[in-house]
Image (cartoon, helix red, strand yellow):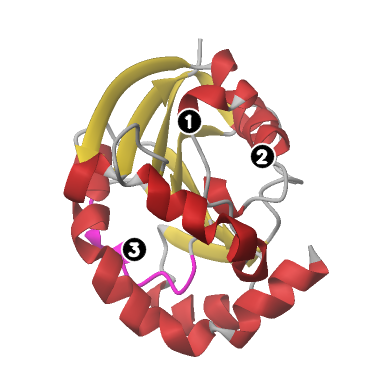
């Protein structure tokens, strides 16, 4: 985790640009989350938190491994938003702590996606919802971009060849909704429930 933490601390200055690129996708994600009744929400990989004011009715706990990013996000803390340094693969919360878990562009950068999803399953209440926004290798011509980038993707701490149906940890959840985003549905918003 230390290597990933150092990497994300070093690229914090890029996040305003990255956030502009991801803004449209995040709006779709947060619009779906905001349709849910008020509840406790854990956002894993909250980054700089620039999108946090868009949530309307939830008590939010945002975690990230990067102290530098969370320091930028401190301005968004309030009575309903708290931020803390924590690794999603080693959550310190009690079982069944949250109604909702949100991961935006996190799953493909997790060292062990299945371990991350085990932890999510543990802290999500039965009947709770998991929202995942991520790039997933499509079954169209865009898959060749992922294949071309694969040899160097580890330098950027992410998996370029990444198909969601091949992630074993997702089998413990039930798919509720799938929305393709971007050209060729390269990005997907997946909503799962915890049985």
Label 1 vs label 3: CA separation?
Answer: 26 Å
In the drawing, what numbered circle is on residue 164? 1
| x and y percentages locating residue 166 in the rendered image | 56, 25
Q: Residue at x 19, y 35 (%)?
A: 35
Residue that badge 3 annotates: 52
Mark before the other along the chain sequence, 1 or 2? 2
Mark before the other along the chain sequence, 2 or 3? 3
Label 2 vs label 3: CA separation?
Answer: 22 Å
Residue that badge 2 annotates: 116
In the drawing, what numbered circle is on residue 180? none
| x and y percentages locating residue 100 in the rendered image | 44, 35
Q: Are marks 1 and 3 in contact (CB under 8 Å)?
A: no
| x and y percentages locating residue 189 in the rendered image | 31, 38
Secondary structure beneath dot 3 equals helix
Query: Mark 1 or mark 3, which is nearer to you?
Result: 1
| x and y percentages locating residue 30 in the rendered image | 25, 48
Secondary structure beneath dot 2 equals helix
Taking the image as drawn, is residue 33 in sight? yes
Question: In the image, 146: left or right of 64?
Answer: left
């Amino acid at each position: 985790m230390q290597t990933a933490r150092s990497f994300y601390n070093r690229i914090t200055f890029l996040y305003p640009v990255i956030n502009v690129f991801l803004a449209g996708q995040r709006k779709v994600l947060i619009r779906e989350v905001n349709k849910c009744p008020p509840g406790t929400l854990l956002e894993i990989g909250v980054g700089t938190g620039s999108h946090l004011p868009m949530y309307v009715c939830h008590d939010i706990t945002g975690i990230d491994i990067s102290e530098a990013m969370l320091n930028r996000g401190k301005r968004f803390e309030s009575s309903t938003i708290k931020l803390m340094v924590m690794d999603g693969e080693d959550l310190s919360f009690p079982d069944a702590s949250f109604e909702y878990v949100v991961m935006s562009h996190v799953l493909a950068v997790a060292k062990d996606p299945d371990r991350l999803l085990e932890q999510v399953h543990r802290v999500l209440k039965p009947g709770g919802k998991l929202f995942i926004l991520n790039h997933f290798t499509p079954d169209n011509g865009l898959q060749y971009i992922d294949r071309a980038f694969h040899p160097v993707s580890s330098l950027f701490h992410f998996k370029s060849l990444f198909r969601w149906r091949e992630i074993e940890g997702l089998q413990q959840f039930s798919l509720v909704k799938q929305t393709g985003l971007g050209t060729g549905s390269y990005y997907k918003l997946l909503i799962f429930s915890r049985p």
